[in-house]
Amino acid sequence: MMTAMGSGAFRGRVHLPFLGLAFFLGTFGGLALAASLPLTALWRGEIATSWVEHAQVHGHLQAIGFVGLFIVGVAYRMLPAFAGRPLPHPALVVPSFWLLALGVVGRAAGQPVSGSPWGAAVFVASAWAELAGVGRCAATVLGVAVPAVRSGRAPYWPFLAAGTVWFVVQAALGALWITALVREGGTVIPVARNAPLLFLQFFGVHLMFILGVGLRAFPTFFAAGPLPASAVQRAFRATQLGTACVLAGGIARAYGLEALWPIESLGFVLLGGGLIRATWFTGWWREPSRIRTASRPSAYLLQPAMAWLVLAGALLVGLSLVRGAGGEPVRTNELDAIRHIVGVGVVLSTIVGMAQMILPEFAGERLLGRQAAWRGMAFGIALVVATALRAGARLFAPWLPPAVVWWSMSLAGVLALLVIGSLGYYFVRGVRSHHLVLEAAARPSAGRAGPPS
Ligand code: HEM
């Protein structure tokens, strides 16, 4: 990989290690914990410190280990094509992979044993490795995104640039706060500090990348017409102002200024409104008429994903207003439910749908006639049910028996694990059978099915 950095083969395969590791960590790490943590809580009947440490490890493995690595790998592969220019600083790509990998694996291995000196050292080192990896990734991605934003060519670029900046900010805050935590002898990031980190990961990073790619691709898929640039810019500005307010309010609360929660709530209202408005331009409710029939089942994952995003935006606005009127911030269980609507409903569904539509490993499957139509539908239905079970269990927890809450969550985890595990299997199969795809593409009859995109 290192030697062939400037070659076409490197450009075509740059995403493979990122996605390979993402599938591994997502399936055997984050989602295995997602399915097992609720049952542990149910059987033990209490939430021990080690449970919270593992819940934080689950969150990090999912948010950075699966989604983060996926975003970085796909960005390295797709952004040069979006921008029509090569990836700048290609020498940073390989170090960014190893640093991110060390960061995420070190966090998963170090945090649960961070009561010991070695565990604490690994926990802290992992956070700084992650910051170094994210910094290298940001230098590369911003090298493409900033000139594109400056040229004002397309209104989706600011979302991609902002997502990259927030990626760095959350990694820097994480490194500082984890270092402070370990110095004080703690093993669990306190809720007040964890909340702004998680907020940035979901709303600053994941959703900005999804909206960036979505605003570029979905209007075409759903025949929605060209993007109205100034209206998209207004939606973008609302999301950024909202994110900045939530972050400012969250950091103030992390340092004991509890009374500043209204800034956070105002931020949620702006952000929620901006997200709903931005989603509008994708035209997600229309028939995906511009997508080839063979890829269409995967597009049916994108529609629920956008519907969940509208719901998440509406909940941010509605709950901030309702709770604010009662003189309190949005509650922790409500934020957890919204995060999982975003994490499972929006992010996992979009990744599963888009991966099958745009990655060559899956396009090759279609060419070989291996991608059955049922798969897109089955994945879509499984993720809708998983989102409803996971988010519903937390949102309605005050009115449900604990056994129902924990069993619903565990079932949601199993469903998500089956989807991501299967997609990972098909991805590896696509990588391994790449030579068959090239042979099939070279045959004259391949023209009927179309080349891999
Ligand atoms: C359906 C699958 C999932 C299940 C069953 C699940 C389950 C859980 C559980 C039990 C917790 C502990 C918090 C609590 O309820 O008290 C949690 C927290 C969390 N989850 Fe998930 N989760 C799932 C999917 C995801 C996904 C896809 C993401 C990210 C993309 C994610 C990110 C997080 C984060 C960031 C936290 C907070 C961890 C912390 O406190 O630092 N989860 N999840």
Image: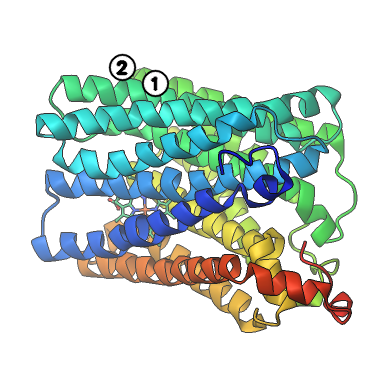
Point 35% across, 24% down: residue: 175
Q: Which mark is residue 255?
A: 2
Quadrant occupied by the N terminus: top right
Regarding residue 266, the answer to whether it shows in the image is no
Point 49% across, 42% down: residue: 202
**Element assignment for label 2:** loop
Question: Of the residues shown, which amino acid type is indicated by label 1?
Answer: Ile
Q: Nearer the viewer, residue 261 or 323?
A: 261
Question: Of the residues shown, which amino acid type is indicated by label 2?
Answer: Tyr
Point 49% across, 30% down: residue: 134
Q: Which mark is residue 266?
A: none
Q: Nearer the viewer, residue 298 or 94?
A: 94
Q: Quadrant of residue 107?
A: top left
Residue 110: x %, y % from top left: 22, 39
Determine whether 109 is above or below 250 in the image. Answer: below
**Element assignment for label 1:** helix
Determine whether 407 is above or below 93 in the image. Answer: below
Residue 227: x %, y % from top left: 85, 43
**Mark 2 to mark 1: distance in Å?**
6 Å
Marks 1 and 2: in contact by CB < 8 Å? yes
Number of residues whose C-alpha sits closer than 10 Å to that of mark 2, classed few (under 14), some (14–19) or many (20 or more): few
Quadrant occupied by the C terminus: bottom right
Q: Quadrant of residue 395?
A: bottom left
Q: Nearer the viewer, residue 97 or 27?
A: 97
Determine whether 134 is above or below 46 in the image. Answer: above
Q: Which mark is residue 251?
A: 1
